[in-house]
Image (spheres, rainbow, N blue to C red):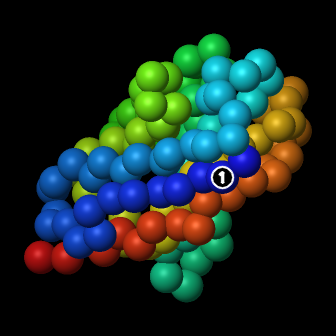
């Protein structure tokens, strides 16, 4: 299984960030897999953004839910993250990761990660 993120790199405040995660080696609709977006900002730890599940259901971090949309294109086997109204605080490396745990029961197991894509928000 391989995950490959892609995105714009440099953005201006208030724009909408759109990132894509291309998944190869398996179908994103395979049962009991959850496709997550996670970021790491400079000097901070990992921050979970949200996921889209094998059945298309989505769950977002309460801290980001008002600005986040995660969707998929099953014909391309891709996951997309949209984050609206970005600010410099959204600068960081964005990762997609597969979770084979049971997030509904509070357990996670991230077993595959992409290499990450840098996003810089600056005026």
Residue 26 left/right relative to 103: left
Residue 36 left/right relative to 78: right
Near-viewer residue (58 or 67)? 58
| Residue neighbourhood size for the residue with mark 1, other residues' Cα within 10 Å, grouped as few (<14), some (14–19), many (≥20) | some
**Looking at the picture, how far across and down is residue 36, in whole percent?**
61, 43
| Image vertical order of residue 24 relative to residue 111, above or below | above
Query: Does dot 1 land on a helix, a strand or a loop?
Result: strand
- Image quarter where the C terminus lies is bottom left
Residue 47 in view here: no
Residue positioned most to the bottom: 43
| Image vertical order of residue 16 relative to residue 66, above or below | below
Near-viewer residue (43 or 100)? 100
Residue drawn 72% across and 47% down?
1
Residue drawn 64% across and 72% down?
45
Residue drawn 74% across and 30% down?
33
Q: Quadrant of residue 107?
A: top right
**Looking at the picture, how far across and down is residue 11, in whole percent?**
20, 66
Residue 90 left/right relative to 38: left
The residue singled out by tag 1 in the image is 2
């Amino acid at each position: 299984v391989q995950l490959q993120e892609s995105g714009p790199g440099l953005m201006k405040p208030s724009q909408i960030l759109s990132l894509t995660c291309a998944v190869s080696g398996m179908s994103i609709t395979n049962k009991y897999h959850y496709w997550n977006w996670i970021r790491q900002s400079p000097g901070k730890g990992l921050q979970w953004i949200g996921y889209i599940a094998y059945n298309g259901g989505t769950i977002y971090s309460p801290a980001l839910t008002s600005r986040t949309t995660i969707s998929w294109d099953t014909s391309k086997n891709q996951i997309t993250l949209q984050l609206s109204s970005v600010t410099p605080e959204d600068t960081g490396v964005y990762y997609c990761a597969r979770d084979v745990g049971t997030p509904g029961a509070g357990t996670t197991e991230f077993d595959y990660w992409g290499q990450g894509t840098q996003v810089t928000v600056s005026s």
